[in-house]
Amino acid sequence: MVVRDLGHVDYLPTIEAMKAFTQARGVETPDELWVLEHPPVFTQGIAGKEEHLLAPGEIEVIRTDRGGQVTYHGPGQIVVYVLCDIRRAKLGVRGLVTGLEQAIIAFLSEFGLVAEADPKAPGVYVSGEKIASLGLKISRGSSYHGLALNVNPDLEHFGRINPCGYAGLRVTSLAQLLGEQCPSQADAAERLVEHLRSKLPLQ
């Protein structure tokens, strides 16, 4: 498996690069994790409804091909795109989602945070507040898109939407929960990747 740290990159070129990678990959192509951060952007999944965009203001809204409704990406958030041959890994979509959720839960437990997944609303929650979102696309037996974990983003931006299509859903972050004990984004990303390695049968 290959881990690529892409740094701070725009949303659209990154999505196009993932699509191209997925279309070109063969049976021997290693799986990849792309670790990155986006500038502020709202993204609408394939089932996204305009009613969940409350007040996007100056932040761009981009319709994309992942599952789910609207979410926010921006500085202070770790995004990990999971480019995995799920057939080779013998994973179904549910198995991949569960693996991602369990990796995030194990990561959060390092900081004494008790987190849980919600099968009705994919993602990870601490005391009912969402700290990580998931959204995937499967093409040619392989996944792309992935997860977004809130380290220290501007949480005000989540108030401009119904996060993941749920009115009133509260969103939190590591910084809000841990205060001065919050890890740096680089440290958090490194530790999260190790949990993804342990929970997913990537090759």
Image: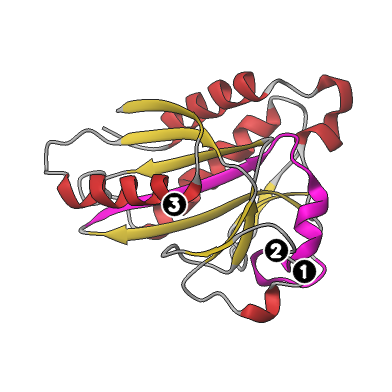
Q: Which mark is residue 153?
A: none
Cα separation, mark 3 vs mark 2, equals: 20 Å
> Could one spot residue 35 in this view of the protein?
yes
Q: Is residue 18 above or below residue 63?
A: above
Indicate whether residue 155 is drawn in magenta: yes
Q: Secondary structure at mark 3?
A: helix
- Position of residue 102 measured from the top left corner of the image (x, y, whole percent): 55, 42
The residue wearing badge 3 is: 12
* Amino acid at pointer 1: Ala
Residue 107, by quadrant, is: top right
In this view, the residue in front, 32 or 199, is: 32
Cα separation, mark 2 vs mark 1, equals: 12 Å
Question: Which residues lie in the magenta part?
Answer: 141-168
* Amino acid at pointer 2: Pro
Q: Is residue 102 above or below residue 166?
A: above
* Amino acid at pointer 3: Leu
Contact between labelled residues 2 and 3, with CB atoms less than 8 Å apart: no
| Residue positioned 22% across, 33% down in the render | 30
Sequence-wise, the earlier of marks 3 and 2 is 3
The residue wearing badge 2 is: 163
Residue 202, by quadrant, is: top left
- Position of residue 56 measured from the top left corner of the image (x, y, whole percent): 72, 64
